[in-house]
Amino acid sequence: MERTIQKKFPVGGGSWVTVDVYGEPDAPGLVVVPGAMSDALGWRAVATAVDAWPSVAVVNRRGRAPSGPLTASYSLRTEVADLGAVLDGLGGVRTLFGWSYGGLIALLAADERPLGQVIAYEPVIRPFGLDVLPDLKAADEAADPDRAVEIVHRRIAGLDGEVVDALRADSEAWEALRGLAAPIYAEMAALYGEPAPDALARRADRVDLIVGGANRGTAPYGTSFDDVARRVPGAGVHELPGQGHMAHLQAPAELARLMEGLAAAG
């Protein structure tokens, strides 16, 4: 499935959200919500590998080009409202999928509006990232995206120094990461803008939660996954064997097959 069109939705406050659409642009299908340190382009391999829906619409959340700025009033609720504008604009969405921070946004949206199916891959929720929040704030105030990228990859993702050094040595890849790091402090801080909800996705007919086998039961992604799963007691829990948080980049075909299987089950 190839990208056919890009749509733009105004979301108020002088910002906007773009959506990359693959397949039939007017057919109800799958909507993908990427998380932090990710954009619509990063989900291209998954979108092109999925065939269970006639269309795949990948949201390019605010704060990453060509979508608009975060704005001063940014919060987690801003993200939910943005997603609502996208869902209303697209119409007839069959399945909503979210990854990481995007998974939490999707689950919160399904607490406010009826949705047929929600799938979330390793959604995060507070206290995720609390230990690095002060350092991310300092990097943001110093306008130091290099430091922000280092914090995310070393202290959250747990990559060793050699891996991070290899990323830095690839100037094109590192520059892309610097751009994606621009909203990371605001996004992480948004997790703490209000108390964590006791329940999620209460208006979804079906919820499926996916955890990478490499992260099952381990901090920070596996333990945050468990925190979310407890808030969606009726959800199906599924494992993607051998994968971690970046399955969309490291194993897009395997992730696409699992998503298609969940679509068929739903």
Image (cartoon, rainbow, N blue to C red):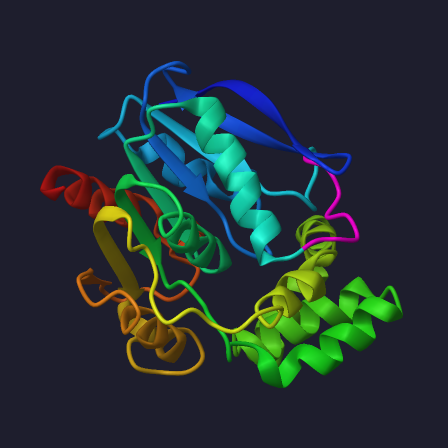
The relative height of residue 156 versus residue 239 in the rendered view (above or below) is below
Kindly indicate the quadrant of the structure image that contains residue 246. Answer: bottom left
Residue at (61, 85) in percent of width and height? 131
The relative height of residue 173 versus residue 100 in the rendered view (above or below) is above
Q: Residue furthest right?
A: 142
Q: Relative to 238, is 131 on the left or the right? A: right
Query: Quick check: is 71 in the magenta stretch?
Result: yes
Q: Quadrant of the N terminus?
A: top left
Start-end of magenta stretch:
67-74
The relative height of residue 132 versus residue 172 in the rendered view (above or below) is below
Q: Relative to 47, is 151 on the left or the right? A: right
| Magenta stretch, main secondary structure class | loop
Query: Quick check: is 27 in the magenta stretch?
Result: no
Indicate the position of residue 239 as horizontal and vertical percent values.
22, 64
Residue at (37, 72) in percent of width and height? 198
Q: Quadrant of the C terminus?
A: top left
Indicate the position of residue 95 as horizontal and vertical percent values.
29, 37
Q: Nearer the viewer, residue 155 or 63?
A: 63
Residue at (74, 53) in percent of width and height? 73
Q: Residue furthest bottom?
A: 131
Q: Nearer the viewer, residue 159 or 255?
A: 255
The relative height of residue 8 versus residue 82 in the rendered view (above or below) is above
Indicate the position of residue 36 as horizontal and vertical percent values.
57, 57
Q: Nearer the viewer, residue 119 or 178?
A: 119
Q: Nearer the viewer, residue 68 or 241?
A: 68
Residue at (23, 53) in percent of width and height? 207
Indicate the position of residue 264 as horizontal and vertical percent values.
12, 38
Kindly indicate the quadrant of the structure image that contains residue 174. Answer: bottom right
